[in-house]
Image (spheres, helix red, strand yellow):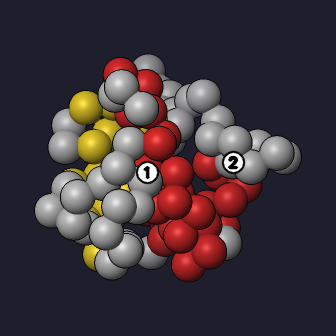
Amino acid sequence: MIVNYYATLRQVVGSREVDFILPQGSTLRQLVQEMVKRYPGLKMEMLDQQGNLYGHIHIFVNGRDHTFLDCSLDTILDPDDTISIFPPVGGG
């Protein structure tokens, strides 16, 4: 599945998009774990001390924010899904 990174996360990963291949039935939570394993710098950007996703990180699955999905981070992903990850963005 394609994972798109935005703003400061793109700098950590070094690319706008990355392809991940996960076993059938993998969840969004497992994808986050795989992302942090592949790109350790994402851990401090996305996860708190207990390994939970920071509330200000928004992960979209096919354009829907994970917080509005029925199973949130436990949503089962399809290999054709497009994932977009947004850190907090400020400016003015």
Cα–Cα gap, marks 2 and 1: 14 Å
**Residue at horizontal 42 percent and vertical 32 percent from the top:** 71
**What kind of element bears circle 1?**
helix
Residue ranking furthest to the left: 80
In the image shown, does 24 or 62 lie closer to the viewer?
24
Q: Position of residue 57 (x, y in %)?
A: 52, 37
In front: 89, or 74?
74
Q: Secondary structure at mark 2?
A: loop
Q: Circle 1: is it few (<14), some (14-19), or many (20+) Cα within 10 Å? A: many
The percent coordinates of residue 43 (x first, y second) are: 68, 59
Looking at the image, tell me whether mark 2 or mark 1 is earlier in sequence order. Answer: 1
Residue 21 image position (x, y, % from top left): 33, 78
Residue on which disc 1 sits: 28
Q: Residue at x 74, y 49 (%)?
A: 51
Which of discs 2 and 1 lies nearer the camera? The answer is: 1
The residue at 44%/33% (across/down) is 72
Q: Is residue 77 left or right of residue 35?
A: left
Image height of 69 relative to 19, above or below: above
Q: Which mark is residue 47?
A: 2
Amino acid type indicated by mark 2: Leu
Q: Picture coordinates of residue 85 (x, y %)? A: 40, 47
39, 62: nearer the viewer: 62
Q: Is residue 18 visible?
A: no
Which image quarter is the C terminus in? top left
Q: Is residue 39 left or right of residue 22?
A: right
Relative to 13, 83 lies left or right: left
Q: Which mark is residue 41?
A: none
Q: Quadrant of residue 33?
A: bottom right
Taking the spot 62% from the left edge, 74% from the top edge, the residue there is 37
Query: In the rendered image of this protein, does residue 31 appear above or below residue 83?
Result: below
